[in-house]
């Protein structure tokens, strides 16, 4: 184990659960923690790659971060081939840190797109685009049919498995902002502004309070276009000064391509706060509708174009759902989508070797970096030497600052938490706001409810009803 | 699944009554009887409710917190996991899980306001440490389904629109958390049992409606009987009994 680091005595301090992994290094960093790559030591899964997300104890003394709670809560309940698999949760009581262990995915759409863009505008082949999109929709359909909105879909959160049994399989990751929306206790907009702005749906940008799974479909549309063009579809500049979902520049970018939304096409537009508040700003600029067809390399008559424009429908109620999208003609025409999105089934197609994720081998689980400057681990590094199954470590370079599965979203909702705004007990599921008794255990009622009064108590339930399963 | 009870972790880990009614060996050694065990859990459910009123979170958060507390004691002893720390911590954790996060620093303040007894006094640090131990004890399963979800549809479907009867039913559902029912029965059956009792009490004839339902009425009736039993025995509970049970837990 000491082969991973040259740090002294890190071994003895390591909690027991950590002993089951060989740490390889840091692969990501975000506001609430770090992500590590590790390999399983147990004989059954020897050398299996695991991504371990470490949540720091929050500084404001509020225990396990709500982001971690959401992620654990949802991922403990769901299983789907196109959703990242939470394999373990660990707690280090000594420093109050929490670790989530996931099946490791070597690639993500951010890196795949970047690879193609940097290699001289080399387009992603149609089979790969279609397969990635189909699997993304398949995972999303599962989430939505289980009343879960992801709320932060973007290329870096869409993982793709590397070499192995699941090669080229898409995994939706990062559920730190995901919500069950069937019976929320608070308006969904209450816990802060969500979704990285480039992929943010127009209704969110205009301040919708009760948004739906349609926000995820808008993001999928943006990602679809980005897979086709290798650049973000609506690349607005984020106004970061105020925690406000209203992002004028982002809306502007959208309107430039899709034209202004109209009340005719989107009747509920009038009820969105920012449509009113910033009427002159938003509706001030007039754009010639350049049209989606001029920014994506698709014929307006193609099935792909039809699907894309249905995902980028302004009115969330008219926007195509994941279930409908999976049935779209685009997926029924050649090339048909496949399970291994990265390797086309037709022989003769070029297989692209995507780069593997960079790993910083100088950071340990405590997140402390050793004093030696970060060095590329390209040759004869300490890691590959003693690591069983540490294939491919050689090609890794230094990590980009905010890689996979972590995002910088601030928890404005936490800061804005307002005690006075919450209703009292008993109103949780009480839409009519009817005052509810806290209990009915008052003694004077008791004698009416005694068991001695025969069951049925005047209402005449036959004593032995047959079971009606 | 997060929204379908039948595929949820909640459904998969429903207990039998006999599994829930097990006093941990460490507690048994101290003389805790099954009756004491139930009494302490009931008292802690009340505590969670009172604390929730102070920090202003809703009934669903209370319900989830009580379910967590009851689940913890299917696995852990009260000797090692002091109920007076577990109860507020469960409320704290449930407030996060139900997206109504309460600030940890508020808890010691309101605890002190509710109970002058030093045995209830815990620091933020202890609550945060217990939060992690509870997460572990729950095996990281945090989604809990409640009768509240199906109740409004049932009431509407059964044509119950009399406000006092609706209130009675909601009150009955709230009271079911003083028992272990949420660990044992699917929540919609608990909701139906409450409607069954309320119908009987208010002499509202819902027989035909119940007959139309595709549920096992025997289970609904058994739950109703348990609730009625609870109300009957509840009258015999005194503060002295609760105190006596807690005193046995002393080291």
Image: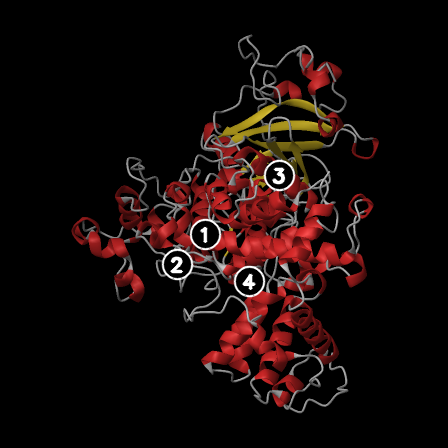
Q: Is residue A52 above or below residue A394?
A: below
The alpha-carbon separation of the residues under discs 1 and 2 comes to 28 Å
Q: Give the label, 4 or 1, closer to the camera.
A: 1
> Which residue has dot 3 on it?
B130
Kindly identify which residue carries mark 4: A327
Neighbours of disc 3 within 10 Å: few (<14), some (14-19), many (20+): many
Left or right, B133 with reference to A307: right
For marks 3 and 4, give the one nearer the viewer.
3
Q: Secondary structure at mark 1?
A: helix
Which image quarter is the N terminus of chain A in? top right
Q: Residue at x 73, y 40 (%)?
A: A165
CB under 8 Å between callouts 3 and 4? Answer: no
Residue extending furthest toward the top: A372
Distance from disc 4 to disc 1, alpha carbons, whole Å, reads 51 Å
Which residue extends farthest front? B240
Among the 4 quarters of the image, the one containing residue B125: top right
């Amino acid at each position: 184990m000491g082969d991973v680091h040259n740090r002294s005595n890190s071994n003895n301090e390591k909690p027991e659960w950590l002993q089951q992994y060989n740490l390889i290094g840091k692969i990501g960093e975000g506001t609430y923690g770090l992500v590590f790559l590790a390999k399983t030591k147990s004989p059954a899964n020897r050398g299996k790659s695991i991504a371990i997300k470490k949540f720091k104890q929050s500084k404001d003394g509020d225990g396990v971060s709500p982001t971690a709670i959401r992620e654990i809560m949802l991922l403990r309940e769901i299983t789907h081939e196109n959703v990242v698999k939470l394999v373990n949760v660990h707690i280090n009581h000594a420093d109050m840190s929490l670790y989530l262990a996931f099946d490791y995915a070597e690639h993500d759409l951010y890196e795949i797109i970047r690879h193609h863009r940097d290699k001289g505008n080399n387009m992603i082949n149609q089979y790969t685009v279609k397969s990635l999109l189909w699997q993304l929709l398949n995972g999303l359909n599962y989430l939505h049919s289980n009343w879960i909105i992801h709320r932060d879909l973007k290329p870096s959160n869409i993982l793709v498995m590397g070499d192995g049994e699941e090669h080229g399989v898409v995994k939706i990751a990062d559920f730190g902002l995901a919500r069950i929306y069937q019976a929320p206790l608070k308006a969904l907009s209450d816990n802060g502004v969500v979704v990285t702005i480039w992929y943010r749906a127009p209704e969110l940008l205009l301040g919708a309070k009760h948004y739906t799974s349609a926000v995820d479909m808008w993001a999928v549309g943006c990602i679809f276009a980005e897979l086709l063009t290798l650049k973000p579809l609506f690349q607005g500049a984020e106004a970061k000064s105020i925690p406000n979902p209203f992002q004028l520049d982002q809306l502007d970018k959208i309107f430039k391509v899709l034209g202004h939304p109209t009340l005719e096409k989107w009747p509920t537009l009038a009820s969105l706060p920012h449509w009113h508040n910033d009427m002159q700003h938003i509706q001030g600029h007039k754009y010639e509708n350049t049209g989606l067809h001029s920014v994506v390399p698709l014929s307006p008559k193609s099935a792909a174009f039809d699907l894309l424009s249905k995902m980028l429908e302004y009115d969330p109620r008219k926007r195509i759902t994941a279930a409908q999208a999976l049935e779209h003609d685009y997926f029924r025409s050649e090339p048909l989508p496949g399970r291994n999105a990265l390797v086309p089934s037709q022989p003769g197609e070029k297989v692209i070797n995507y780069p593997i994720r960079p790993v910083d081998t100088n950071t340990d689980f405590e997140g402390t970096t050793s004093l030696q400057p970060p060095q590329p681990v390209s040759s004869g590094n300490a890691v590959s030497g003693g690591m069983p199954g540490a294939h491919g470590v050689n090609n890794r370079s230094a990590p980009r600052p905010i890689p996979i599965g972590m995002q910088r979203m601030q928890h404005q909702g936490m800061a804005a938490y307002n005690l006075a705004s919450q209703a009292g007990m008993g109103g949780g599921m009480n839409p009519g706001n009817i005052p509810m008794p806290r209990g009915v255990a008052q003694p004077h009622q008791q004698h009416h409810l005694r068991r001695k009064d025969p069951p049925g108590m005047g209402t005449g339930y036959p004593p032995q009803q047959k079971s009606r399963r | 699944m997060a929204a379908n009870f039948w595929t949820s972790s909640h459904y998969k880990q429903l207990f039998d009554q006999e599994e829930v009614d097990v006093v941990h060996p460490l507690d048994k050694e101290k003389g805790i009887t099954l009756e004491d065990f139930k009494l302490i859990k009931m008292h802690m459910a009340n505590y969670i409710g009172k604390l929730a009123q102070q920090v202003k979170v809703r009934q669903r958060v209370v319900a989830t917190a009580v379910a967590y507390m009851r689940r913890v004691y299917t696995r852990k002893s009260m000797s090692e996991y002091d109920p007076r720390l577990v109860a507020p911590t469960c409320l704290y954790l449930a407030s996060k899980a139900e997206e109504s996060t309460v600030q940890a620093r508020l808890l010691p303040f309101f605890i002190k306001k509710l109970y002058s007894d030093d045995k209830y006094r815990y620091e933020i640090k202890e609550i945060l440490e217990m939060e992690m131990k509870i997460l572990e004890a729950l095996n990281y399963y945090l989604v809990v389904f409640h009768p509240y979800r199906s109740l409004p549809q049932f009431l509407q479907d059964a044509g119950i629109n009399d406000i006092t009867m609706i209130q009675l039913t909601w009150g009955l559902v709230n009271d079911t958390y003083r028992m272990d029912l949420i660990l044992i029965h699917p929540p919609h059956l608990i909701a139906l049992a409450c409607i069954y009792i309320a119908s009987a009490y208010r002499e509202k004839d819902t027989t035909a409606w119940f007959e139309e339902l595709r549920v096992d009425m025997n289970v609904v009736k058994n739950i109703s009987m348990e609730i009625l039993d609870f109300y009957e025995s509840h009258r015999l509970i005194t503060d002295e009994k609760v105190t006596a049970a807690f005193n046995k837990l002393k080291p």
